[in-house]
């Protein structure tokens, strides 16, 4: 039986940190709001099961983020076996309708969403959540070397798509995964 | 641009304004947790019951594998194509029907349903018992036995004009009558005997006269009314009890309409008709009009913008739960919430429609299939995302088994 204090502690935590956790989930899922919310619910529900123990530890948020990252990792392992379906982000070519800066950001985010899930997760944890390489490796349950190589590959891909307008062609739906590539990504490490 | 700082800035700009609804989240997490606990308890109880049953049953029963539950058969798509595989090679077209198992995406044996001179396939419909497929060609309707994959003797019906060979067809929910469009008339066919009845004339229009082309046809779930959409943007109700047409309902926004379709919600209360104007720009207006079947009056048209890819013809299908209508125009599929009649974010399936851009939905409502230039593209109705297309050459129309 949960005590009222434990329940209140969980509620306080969700009220204080859910925005920040949702933002990470959004980036992990390529800004698909429904999937991000589902991922966050899953992570919080897992944390809730063990909350009396977690809330007594030093960093409950760190624990929840770890679950978020590992749930995201579970997702890409599952998708490597079962091809991911395409997502309709943007729905067409990006038009620099206000400023070139906004268009660049939009383009960069579309390119980020088009990255393989593992590379995307590494870049989000490293450069959005500002985790160290070692922390990212611990979150994703992979080696330090994998984090380094995936970060380098992810950034290289973003540079290619940013420098070459043809790298993310008009009409391509970011997130559309080649199942063979997904399997290879999963096998890589 | 894609330096680390740029990436960091872009990520923050994209999501920093996003907010979670904490109270809602807390409620959802608790509900999810209770469900989890319930599942754990249920699994424990099931294990105890299994143990209690297994022990008295004796050791003989232990070790025998449980009989697997027979899964329901995956529905079959029947694709009506012209001269598939060989491309268009001349004025004589070889029309075929190809069954495709939706579970595996693998095509079955092609069924040849006759050749026509410069005439591709018409339309296709399946009886509610799934035993017979009807395909229409110019002036004929051919039944196909789905068990054996063999075509029967063609049924000859009147032909309206060389230009209106589409012959859209629909079958009543009791499976007893097929209604086929033949220009400005509708011909009923008795499916027990495969004989045509007297054509029902649905009248002339000022603009099209006798040459008016009917666009499509739908039958209410109770089988009492047939609705016919024509090229002038009129919907004519026909009583199946008397085979007489009623007063037309005007839904067209213009007299220059692209091919449209009509569909009826599973509860039979609303018909939705698509009447896009002909438009030759990349981005065109889409238009769907709901019609109350109780009063035969049109509601406010649902208007949205579609990426046409040069094709403005529009098709429509409704999920079995009646909650969502999917409207295709060119490579765009627009979901519409029927509760509010509001269009959602368009789904891009890629490729141009070959002929119809027709859309059908599986009986379980989980998948919509759209006819595109490269074949048939599945869309998950849960996520509104397209999956991997099944390649079918030169498909003109298709239907799915119940």
Image (cartoon, rainbow, N blue to C red):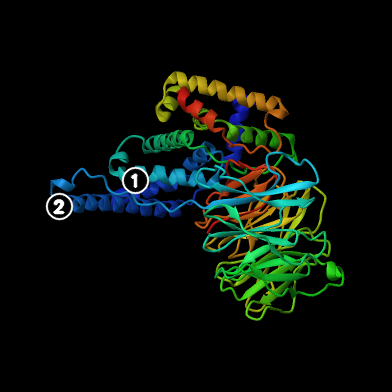
Q: Residue at x 87, y 69 (%)?
A: B207
**Label 1: element kind:** helix
Report x, y in % for residue A189. 45, 23
- Residue A82's label in the rendered image is none
**CA distance for labels 1 and 2:** 41 Å
Can residue B23 be seen? yes
Number of marks drawn: 2
Q: Position of residue B361 (x, y in %)?
A: 57, 55
A170 relative to B172 in the view: left or right:
right
User: Do discs 1 and 2 belong to a common subunit?
Assistant: no
Residue that carries the numbered disc 2 in the rendered image: B57
In the displayed structure, A125 sits above or below B32; it is: above
Front in this rendered view, residue B10 or B380 = B380
Circle 1 sits on which residue?
A48
Q: Nearer the viewer, residue A123 or B77?
A: B77
Q: Quadrant of the N terminus of chain B?
A: top right
- The residue carrying pointer 1 sits among few (fewer than 14), some (14 to 19) or many (20 or more) residues within 10 Å by Cα, namely many
């Amino acid at each position: 039986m949960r005590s009222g204090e434990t329940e209140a502690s969980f509620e306080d935590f969700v009220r204080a940190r859910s925005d920040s956790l949702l933002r990470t989930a959004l980036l992990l899922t390529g800004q698909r709001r429904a999937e991000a919310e589902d991922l966050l619910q899953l992570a919080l529900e897992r944390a809730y099961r063990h909350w009396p123990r977690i809330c007594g530890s030093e960093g409950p948020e760190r624990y929840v983020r770890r679950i978020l990252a590992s749930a995201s990792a579970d997702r890409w392992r599952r998708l490597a076996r079962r091809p991911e379906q395409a997502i309709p982000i943007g729905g067409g070519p990006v038009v620099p309708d206000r400023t070139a800066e906004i268009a660049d950001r939009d383009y960069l985010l579309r390119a980020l969403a088009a990255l393989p899930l593992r590379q995307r997760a590494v870049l989000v944890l490293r450069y959005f959540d500002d985790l160290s390489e070692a922390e990212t490796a611990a979150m994703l349950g992979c080696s330090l070397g994998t984090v380094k190589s995936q970060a380098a590959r992810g950034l290289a891909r973003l540079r290619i798509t940013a420098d070459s307008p043809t790298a993310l062609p008009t009409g391509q739906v970011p997130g559309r995964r080649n199942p063979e590539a997904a399997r290879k990504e999963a096998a890589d490490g | 641009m894609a330096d680390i700082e740029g990436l960091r800035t872009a990520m923050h700009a994209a999501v920093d304004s996003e907010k979670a609804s904490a109270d809602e989240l807390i409620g959802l997490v608790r509900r999810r947790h209770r469900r989890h606990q319930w599942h754990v308890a249920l699994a424990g109880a099931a294990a105890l019951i299994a143990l209690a049953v297994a022990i008295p049953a004796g050791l003989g029963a232990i070790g025998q594998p449980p009989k697997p539950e027979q899964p329901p058969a995956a529905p079959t798509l029947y694709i009506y194509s012209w001269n598939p595989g060989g491309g268009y090679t001349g004025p004589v077209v070889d029309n075929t029907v190809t069954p495709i198992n939706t579970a595996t995406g693998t095509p079955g044996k092609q069924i040849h349903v006759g050749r026509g001179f410069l005439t591709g396939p018409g339309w296709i419909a399946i009886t509610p018992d799934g035993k017979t497929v009807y395909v229409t060609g110019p002036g004929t309707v051919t039944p196909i036995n789905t068990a054996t994959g063999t075509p029967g003797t063609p049924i000859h019906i009147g032909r309206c004009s060389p230009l209106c060979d589409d012959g859209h067809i629909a079958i009543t929910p009791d499976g007893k009558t097929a209604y086929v469009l033949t220009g400005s008339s509708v011909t009923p066919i008795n499916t027990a005997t495969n004989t045509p009845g007297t054509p029902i004339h649905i009248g002339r229009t000022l603009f099209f006269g006798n040459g008016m082309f009917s666009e499509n046809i739908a039958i209410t779930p109770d089988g009492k009314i047939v609705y016919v959409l024509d090229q002038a943007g009129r919907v004519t109700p026909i009583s199946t009890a008397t085979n007489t047409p009623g007063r037309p309902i005007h839904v067209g926004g213009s007299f220059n309409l692209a091919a449209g379709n009509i569909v009826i919600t599973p509860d039979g209360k609303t018909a939705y008709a698509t009447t896009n104007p002909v438009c030759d720009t990349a981005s065109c207006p889409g238009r769907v009009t709901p019609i109350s079947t109780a009063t035969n009056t049109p509601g406010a048209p649902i208007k949205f913008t579609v990426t046409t890819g040069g094709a403005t013809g529009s098709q429509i299908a409704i999920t079995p739960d009646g909650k969502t209508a999917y409207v295709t125009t060119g490579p765009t599929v627009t979901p519409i919430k029927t509760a509010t009649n509001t269009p959602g974010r368009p789904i891009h399936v890629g490729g141009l429609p070959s002929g119809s851009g027709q859309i059908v939905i599986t009986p379980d409502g989980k998948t919509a299939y759209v006819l595109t230039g490269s074949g048939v593209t599945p869309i998950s109705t849960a996520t509104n995302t397209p999956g991997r297309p099944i390649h079918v050459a030169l498909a003109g129309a298709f239907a799915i088994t119940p």
